[in-house]
Image (tube, grey):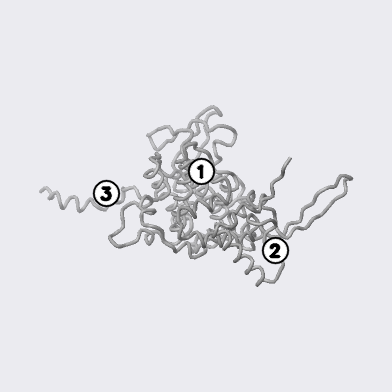
Amino acid sequence: MRLPIVLALALCAPTLLACTTRDDDFLLLRRVETKGPSEPTRLVPATSNDSEALYVRELLANGFGAELLRTYAMSKRFAARTFDVRTTQTTIALGAPDFMAGPAPERSVAIGWWRTGMAADAPVIWIDDTVPSDKRSSMDDVVSGLGEALVDVIYAGSPCRVAAPSPLRRGYVEFLRVVGAEWRAPRLTDDRDDLRRRSSYARVHANDAVRAEIETTFGSSGARVVTERPMRSAWQMMDDPVVVATVLYRLASSDLSRTMADPAVYLPFLETRPPRDVHPALLLGAFRNFQAKLISAWSRANAAGRPPQDLIDLIGAYADAYPAERAEVTRIYLVTTYGVTAIADGVRADVPPDAVESQLAALTADVLFGRRGLRDGFRYIHN
């Protein structure tokens, strides 16, 4: 006797749903040896007894790895819907990256009897586990790989298709590392100590990239001259990725992460529209709420032909996108940098705290009311 069609579909539903592509799915491949150096890079699915693949899957299934994977997925959806950018499945490859020795070669993916090519410029997140384990961290590789991929998506809608300036790119990745070092980790895959051992983790928390710097120079006679400055110069700060990471970390740790923008900002990031009267930001959580706002502001500035060249440009793009948050964004930036880019030498940190606070409050008001700009503290060198 034949089963009724409805009953048959009901019995098959679990299988069909299990095959449905999830928003945060990824393809995990392993690079294998080829017959010769001229052969295309050969990638195969990671096997069930591949210990590194098993660990990477665990990192991406729970904790910060999973949150970052979802952030990457929503950023690709935003780029596809907003800028009509073609996106592909998230692909992670274990092994030595194939672009290290020069231009990326052709790639071949083998899944059982099925063979296909992969474009040389197809986005691949590489995790190089050929490096000795005492010199690498799987968690660090996951965070940095997804962070770099996120920046690539942010710039995908740029008419010039330019890459992010190095301090912004590296600073954004360092910011993600600091967040990952503090994210509640799964019980069996706690790699946070590997991220906390990075020097940038302590420097971000201590605001060390902004504070006093000892500069060593040599005079005309060759004598060594040591100068201790209360603050680094504006130029040095803009070139330091740790300063970028520190400001982004403080923004993300503030009430801005819970401040919701207009619902239209979030809709391109979501797989489906939220229920009526439910704000889209509530579906993302605090971390991805801030990420969605930052990615949207950064991407739209790129698409408008105004790609941020440094941290000040990025802060300006964010404030322009969300005017209601301008005051708090400006305050956090000036407090973090002690106003060095707004006034020459900034506000000294070695004076009583009350004096520092009052000077920074006055400086913030001057900037917000247009009496001073965030770049007024730069010292230009004239020939």
Q: Are marks 3 and 1 in contact (CB under 8 Å)?
A: no
Q: Earlier in the sequence, mark 2 or mark 3?
A: 3
Asked whether the viewer can see residue 8, the reply is yes
Mark linked to residue 348: 2
In this orientation, which residue lies closer to the viewer: 185 or 339? 339
Q: Are marks 2 and 3 in contact (CB under 8 Å)?
A: no
Image coords of residue 85 (percent x, y) = 40, 40
Residue at (21% x, 53% y) in the render: 11
Q: Earlier in the sequence, mark 2 or mark 1?
A: 1
Query: Which residue position is annotated with label 1?
Result: 306
Other residues around mark 2 within 10 Å, as few (<14) / some (14–19) / many (≥20): many
Q: Quadrant of the C terminus?
A: top right
Q: Quadrant of residue 357?
A: bottom right
Q: Amino acid at mark 1?
A: Arg
Mark linked to residue 16: 3
Q: Is residue 187 left or right of residue 74?
A: right
Q: Relative to residue 157, is residue 247 depicted above or below? A: below
